[in-house]
Image: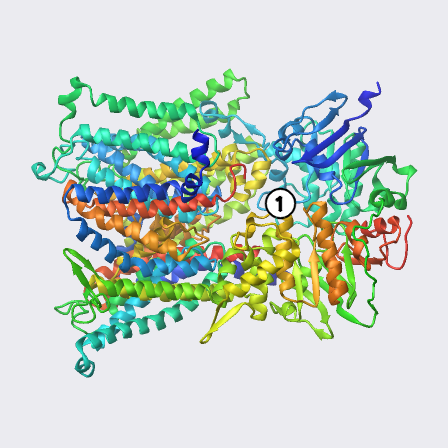
Amino acid sequence: MEKTEYVLKMDNIAKQYYGNRVLKGVDLSIKPGEIHALMGENGAGKSTLMNILFGMPVIHSTGGFEGTVEIMGQPANIDSPIKAMEYGIGMVHQEFMLIPGFTVAENIKIGREITTPNLLSRIIGPTLETLDFEAMSRDARKALKTIGLQIEDYIKVAGLPVGYMQFIEIAREIDKTGIKLLVFDEPTAVLAESEAERLLEAMRVIADQGIAIIFITHRLDEVMAVADSMTVLRDGEFVARKEIKDTSVVDIAELMIGRKVEKLVEEEDEDNRVLSDENVAIQLRDYKVDMQGERVRGIDLDIRRGEILGIGGLAGQGKLGIPNGIMGLYPAAGTVTVNGQVLNLDKLGEALRHKIAFVSEDRRGVGLLLEESIEQNIVFSALQTNNRFLKKVAWMQFYDHKSAGRHANDMIGQLDIRCRSSRQPAGRLSGGNQQKVCLARALTLEPEILFVSEPTRGIDIGAKKLVLELLTKLNRETGMTIIIVSSELVELRSIADRIAIVSDGRLACILKPDDSDANFGLAMSGAWKKGGEEES
Amino acid sequence: MNKNTNLIKRITQMIFDSKVTILFLLLFIIAAIISGKSLTFIIPELFTRIARNGFLILSLIIPILAGMGLNFGIVIGAMAAQISLFITIYWGLTGISGFLITALLALPIAAFLGTLVGRLFNQMKGSEMIGGLVLGYFADGFYWLLFLFVFGGVIAFDNSKLMIASDASAYNPVSINTAVRCVAVFCLALTLLLAAARKAKHLAVPVKTLAIKCGLAVFVLVLTFIPQLEPFLSHSTVTNGIGVKNSIDLMGIYKYALDTVPMIKIAEYGFYIYIIFSLVSLVMKMIYRQKIHWKSVVIKTVIVCGAYALTFIPAVDEFMRRDKVYLITVVDVLLPFTFGWQAAKWFNARFVEKKSWNWHRAVLPVAGAAVVYLVSFIPSVYKAFQLTQIPVMTYLCIGGVCLLNNGLMKTKLGQDMRTVGQDRTVANAAGIDVDKTRIIAMVFSTVLAAWGQLIYLQNLGTMQTFGHTMVAQYAIAALLVGGASVNKATNRQALLGVFLFHALFVVAAPAIKVLLGGDAGAIEEYFRAFVSYGVIALALALHAWKKKAAK
Amino acid sequence: MTESITNSRVFKGLAKFGLPRIIIAAFFLLLLFGTAVLDLGVTSALGNCISRWGMYGILALAMVPSVQCGVGLNFGISLGITTGLLGGLISIQLDIANNPALVAISPTFAVLAAFLAAILMACFFAAVLGYFYGLLLNQVKGSEMTVTTYIGFSMIAFMNIMWTVLPFKSGTLIYPNAGRGIRNQVSLDSSYKGAISNILKFKIGSLTVSTGLILFFLLMCLIVWLFMRSKTGLAMSAVGANPMFARAAGINTNKMRLVGTMFSTVLAAVGIITYSQEYGFFQMYNAPQMMGFISAAAVLIGGASPKRATIFNVLLGTFLFQGIMALGLPVANQLFPGTSLSEILRILISNGIILYALAQTKGGGSRE
């Protein structure tokens, strides 16, 4: 009797990617018609868990998983997305799988069009069956009605507001016969407030019809508003499962963040720095950046000279957009003042000329010329901006291989870059060493201000410590202002002087490293309203 | 106030969207005036060209809908047509029956080649257009090889109509024996090399197919050493002439084969096909216990039988024995016909299927037909229409392709193609086999292109064996002129494109003569090439610019 | 045992080289062998190879700047070629080679001056046209290959009309008997045929080596190499390899692409004049149409890809490709006289290697 109470029961799920454990014994149980929130920071394991639920190829091609999955009390072996669909599991993606040029009905019925056989189809094959637009239209209207979206089924999707598109995605899923469980992956991320409210209402309606919902989100207020129960994951581990009525926003925030803060870096030397609010290196006023997926919507921030500032926040909330905009990689607006001078955000290379260097979060995509040698990668920026490592012949400047080589070897020693020689192509190195090359290039510019995005992503623990120690050393010895943008709160809390949390493209608040976990959690989940703590 | 500005905005938007078409129209009008040629010259020429080229251009539509862009590879379909033409001429076939057999023969050849093209395009998603272009040239090489060496060289063809006569004794003959041995060894080496390459890349090596291929090559090789086969195999490969003639005259063979099909035959066969078709359909429906709309079946049969019965009336019979209709007759009939057709649709909607019918959609065709009818009263136009002859069968074929294009899109296959064409990722997520769908689209296009080329050749009357290189460029340019783009094309645009594109060239030659005085000669060809390339370059650039702006 | 073979570096290197390239190299050797066997004169054939290498080399070199700056294979070098032809024709029209003042110094000097004048004018026209061409290409990022091809074709068709109507008066240029327009093949006999080819030309038996031509080719290669190692050159290569990286380093992507395109067009102009002075004729009208594909095929054979091309690719590829052409003709004529087998060979090889390169890029897997 107990068993069939759950529509989905995942027990002791574990998964590792090439020796890296991303899920360590996670449980998930959902009752029919229940709205269950799945919460956790980035890297907590939510996406991996969902990939397992959906039988995504990436799971099975990397060694499968451990643990059991039961649907409606029966063991289920989901090894492909089609199987998942057959079991009645649907997913509303963050990036809409819609075709703008098709009508609403066509989108709802995509791949599952209703057809009637005709003469040719019987001879040649079912693909030539005629489309039954009438029947498809009927089904579409039914689905739309269920979720309360008032639009005609024959209009084209192109040009519809984002909220409508999301609803059409949902309609498509509930149109599939036998849907028992729907997963919503950060559905409100792209919606305006009113649209988000409508969505939550629609979720209630769907749940009332007996379809269970897994609601992946970081917005605590939404969770409190609509969910029945929730599961919190942290670092791939199961932390807690609670009924919403038994918990609060602060409680959840603490669960999401809370861990022992081990200082990754030992403070050996005395801290002789003088940091003052008047001595400002960079000043941001109403700063906006148009970066896909990391939009900045207006930030006011003062970065003090000589400090290590951490910028944290969840993925997609805008923290990565901040340095990318200043460096001119993405269109930016607002006022950015560097050492008292206004920075022209439209002119390429301006930031470099103001002695600002940047280590991008996208090592392979932006940070390196993979086919070129380590040496070339390291000296490139300084070569172009400061005209170093060049030999002058007549009116032309040529690459000075000797001085470049010397400097490269110097950097390789300093940063302990593991490679065969400085001539090796940068693409051959391991992730950690590639990161060091990027760092080396930034340091070759001899900057006064350094932005580092996700400095230790994909690097093993030993290299992590090295990089963080190096940054601290640079700061203490040369007075370099360092801004670290990272999604790993641990590293921010271990070396930063202050930590700014960015949520929804805006500055939520600035915290001290030893501030309470709850504060961090609240700030990151957008439940922090300006001007103080908020408890809902 | 708002409605007016909206309307103006929409009209300006429409004009901007069809700028290529309008530009062409202007060019045409200017050239027509300069050339000083009358409508009596222009219009008959124009309709001949539409008959000749229409089918080919319509074959471009399906790949565009499937997201593969402008199919520069239709030249391969043309090649398939020419190969089958060559074969049936060699067999001595003529007339409409021979023509139909040629079309039938071209089908498997074109289909096979189409699958190859499709598979290649699947390897270069995103670069299909340049790929198709280069593939066209590449295939040309094989075509030359085939027509210059294999036909007549390796395979003896004794036919003065087709082959270049030459003295065989001048050659240093390679015996069949040697040729076969070389080929076998080469294939063996290639197979082994390919397998080794796969091994080096740590890819799976299909041992079974490998063994079969090697075994086959070795078997053939061994065959050449069997003493019994010696005398047969030591023949020289060069017998009569090597190489096909540069231009083959189709007079008396296939010239006008399709154009001269009398209407009575069309009606006859049409009637028989319809009866068979509806009988089979009825039987199928009964077997599968599907609902039969007896009322509409009966009504349709009655109408068809009645129409066929009409053709027995002597006066009608006389008329139907002809193969061509005068344009003026068509125009005269067009208005009442269009009106009647729309009325029948209304009748069907109201009384038979009992659903609403949007009469707005009827206005445009009826108004259009009325305008054409009124225009035909202008004396010069009337004279021109009187002179123009429309080959009925050919135009029916063109109509058929239009119906095919539309009909295909109403099936699941067509919907899959459209989905793949819009967004491959979404299509894949929805469970559609993207690769297979694209290959099928290519097969359709290549086969239609082959038939289109056959229609072209039978009207032209001569086959330029090596003159098919510009087939793709002209067809694509015409389509673009009609307002189509790299990712959208309709039947209407294709027909409009044929009309305008060829209209321009009908008047361009005389216009150039007038402008430059004396013999225009090669300039006309250059001008045509320039316009075609220019239109394509413009369309490609615009498309690329839009794509970049969208990112 | 097979494992150790397939894992060896030689094998891996060969695999990376690509099967079609191996086939082509093998084919070249086969033809060389065939020439010797059929007793067709290996030395003169080799001389032919070398001279063709020099003739087509600079045209292939024109691919390097455009590939490196991210524009890809410049099928539209026909623009550069037509400007080159224009410059070359004007030089003939002005009859610089027979200018009395220059001839007085020395006839060879006059011929060289004519050649130089042709090159300078060609470079000027090419630079201007290349600039506008580059502006256009910056607007169509991602579809450069298709657009360049058709712009190239349109340009040729347009110039065909121009060649027929432009007011060239010189006898060598226009058709005799009051014919219309420039001849199909304009002879360079009376102007600067062999201007640089004849420098330091020497014969060993039946082997003729146009040293001047080779030296000029290598000089151009050197210029390109030097440019690639300059600050601008490095910036340009970065743009082609990773545009975001270049942006992050403060480099203006569009400007670099413009530089690359202009350089490519200028090289093409120089290339056609070099080619023609060795060949002895300017081939007008539709002859340059396939030059883009031939040059692209040459660098691809040499190991380049649509994203990376080095001077080594140019040297190796042009030699192999033109070598096959040079050797293939007499062999084909011996086996199958009176046929255009070599032409077919050219079509198959050049287009085949381009298809291979395009298929390697594999945009999207089969499930996408």
Q: Nearer the viewer, residue C230 or C259?
A: C230
Q: Looking at the image, is C160 positioned above or below residue C32?
A: below
Q: Name the subunit of mark 1.
A: A
Structural crowding at the residue carrying mark 1, measured as other residues with C-alpha within 10 Å and reported as few (<14), some (14–19) or many (≥20): some
Residue C302 point in image, percent of width and height: 36, 50
Quadrant placement of the N terminus of chain A? top right
Residue A373 point in image, percent of width and height: 53, 55
**Which quadrant of the figure has residue B432?**
top right
Q: Nearer the viewer, residue A37 or A449?
A: A449
Residue located at (62% from left, 46% from top): A157
Residue C353 point in image, percent of width and height: 36, 46
Report the colour scheme. rainbow
- Residue lying furthest top: B287
Q: Looking at the image, is C5 positioned above or below residue B372?
A: above
Q: Is residue B461 visible?
A: no
Residue A379 point in image, percent of width and height: 57, 62
Residue located at (28% from left, 54% from top): B383
Q: Nearer the viewer, residue C72 or B401?
A: C72
Q: Nearer the viewer, residue A388 or C221?
A: A388
**Which quadrant of the figure has residue C286?**
bottom left
User: What residue did someone put label 1 on?
Assistant: A155
Left or right of B174? Residue A432 is: right
User: Tag count in the figure?
Assistant: 1
Q: Looking at the image, is B540 positioned above or below residue C272?
A: above
Q: Is residue B319 visible?
A: yes
Left or right of B403? Residue A409 is: right
Q: Secondary structure at mark 1?
A: loop
Identity, as a three-letter code, of the amino acid under mark 1: Ile
